[in-house]
Image: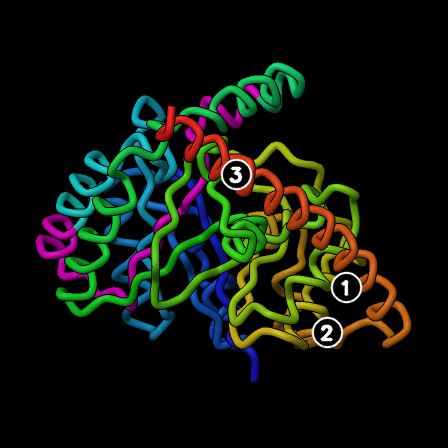
Amino acid sequence: MVRLCFFCELEAGALAELFADGTVIRDLLALRAGVSLGLVDLSPERAAVVVKLQQVGVPLIAWLLLDQADGYFAHAGNAAAVSARYEAFRRWSAEHGLRWEGVGLDLEPARHELELYDRSPWRGLLRWIRNAFDESRLGDSESAYAGLADRIRAHGLRLEVYRFPLMLDERRAGSRLLRRGAGVADVAADREVLLVYSTLSVPRGPALLCSYAREARAIAVGSTGGGIDHAPKLTEAAFRRDLGIAAAAAEDVYVFSLEGCVRRGMLTGLARDGVPGPPGRAAVAFWQAAGGALRLCLRAFLRTAAAAERLFGRMKNEG
């Protein structure tokens, strides 16, 4: 049976309100679903909600988030701030007697860079191209995050990372171009969750989801709305389609977001009807082929770029 986990990215007051009447907890328990709770703050009010959830047995992941000034997500330029946030999280958890199954790191570009892409895609693309050729962009971040990962495991916690799926193709191609452009480190984890939101995919639709789902042990679908997300929202039919595709392929399926599902009545529908099955085989096969073709083109480009980098590097050393 597939394991469900819902991302939740609410301020403390809205979080308390979400769980106030017990309906959401009832639905989560019916689905045997967990929550990856975005730690927007480390407040007593948030701790009270965590205690309520752990008392009834809802599995909880501590999704580490930073202040916006520090980039919000875990990226190549803020490893020290993420490490400090983790230590603050440990003190807060000890103070309030909080128990967690794991810690989640959201490996995305800095929030201000994502907002630039939203406001002006062309300016965002130009900045990404410039960053992609900056050799200092990743710096020592990957070794710093590896050290943090070791500390998390030493404290008896599972480490989860949430990342965009193009990184899988970059690894295969032996490239670092995408990581440098996005300013995102590659961090080895106990569970790697691929964020394959069909509302963000280019082209729109489930083609990339179908392709990546075949090789992912954990995959996230969305978006149903919520958090800081400004992407177009899935219709209920598209949400059930994407959830069915992911659940048929992966052991663990994540949904962004819990608050979006609650607001739109989707969570109660899932608790009542269960996780939907996948679409017809012909449709899935078509989408897999389309997504696979796109990924082949991407890997060919990345291999060419990596080969060119190696060539220029040798020429530079010989010169």
Q: Residues within 10 Å of mark 1 (few under 14, many from 20)?
A: some
Element class at badge 1: helix
Give the residue at the far right of this rendering: 282
* Residue at 42% across, 35% down: 314
Element class at badge 2: loop
Quadrant occupied by the C terminus? top left
Mark 1–mark 2 CB contact (< 8 Å): yes
Q: Position of residue 185 (x, y in %)?
A: 37, 43
Which one is earlier in the sequence, the residue at label 1 or at label 3?
Answer: 3
Q: CA distance from mark 2 to mark 3?
A: 34 Å
Quadrant occupied by the N terminus? bottom right
Q: Position of residue 80 (x, y in %)?
A: 19, 36
The residue tagged 1 is 241
* Residue at 26% across, 64% down: 100
Q: Residues within 10 Å of mark 3 (few under 14, many from 20)?
A: many
The reply to whether the magenta stretch includes residue 54 is no
In this picture, which residue range is highlighted in magenta? 90-116
Q: Nearer the viewer, mark 1 or mark 3?
A: 3
**71 lies left or right of 232:** left
The residue tagged 3 is 178
Q: Amino acid at mark 3?
A: Leu
Please state the total of marks drawn on the protein image: 3
Give the residue at the far bottom of this rendering: 1
Q: Is residue 258 visible?
A: no
Which one is earlier in the sequence, the residue at label 1 or at label 2?
Answer: 1
Q: Amino acid at mark 2?
A: Pro
Quarter of the rendering containing residue 212? bottom right
The residue tagged 2 is 276
Q: Nearer the viewer, mark 2 or mark 3?
A: 3
Mark 1–mark 3 CB contact (< 8 Å): no
Q: Amino acid at mark 1?
A: Arg
Q: CA distance from mark 1 to mark 2?
A: 8 Å
